[in-house]
Image (cartoon, rainbow, N blue to C red):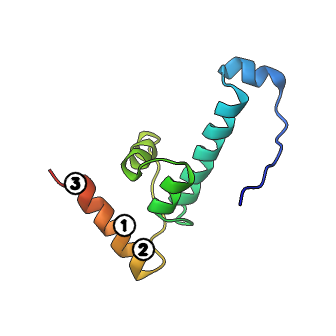
Amino acid sequence: MTQKINIKLPHDLLELTGLTSKRLEEKSLLIWILELYSEGKITLSKAANLVNMKVDDFLLEFRKRHLKHMGGPETVEELKDDFNTIQELTED
């Protein structure tokens, strides 16, 4: 389920960034999800899914912003999923 919220921004902010409303919405969601993942509030696979990205693309975005992951998996299944994902990404 999706809930729509409104955020008031100065009009010139959109002009300054050159972003469309849709692109600003996508970018804001990505930044928010990156932060939630960094804080350990959501898993890697959940974070990537929320922004419709492949896990490796999400990790690249995460690393590009020099963020650090503070949390860990909450269940053994999440740990296994994260471990399998890391193995897949590091295979030659």
Which residue is outermost to the left? 92
Residue closest to the eye, 28 or 4: 4
- Type of the residue with mark 3: Thr
Few, some or many C-alpha atoms within 10 Å of disc 3 (few <14, some 14-19, many ≥20)?
few
Give the amino acid at mark 2.
Answer: Glu
> Considering the numbered disc 2 on the image, is that residue within a helix, a strand or a loop?
helix
**Mark 1 or 3, nearer chain start:** 1
| Residue 78: mark in rendering | 2
Query: Quadrant of the image for the N terminus?
Result: bottom right
Check the image and report above or below for 62 versus 46: above
Instruction: Say left or right for 11 vs 24.
Output: right
Residue 66: x and y, percent?
44, 44
Q: Residue at x 34, y 74 (%)?
A: 80
Counting from the top left corner in percent of width and height, residue 41 is at 57, 66
**Mark 2 and 1 residues: CB-CB less than 8 Å, in contact?**
yes
Question: Looking at the rendered structure, which numbered label has been put on residue 82?
Answer: 1
- Which numbered tag is attached to residue 51? none
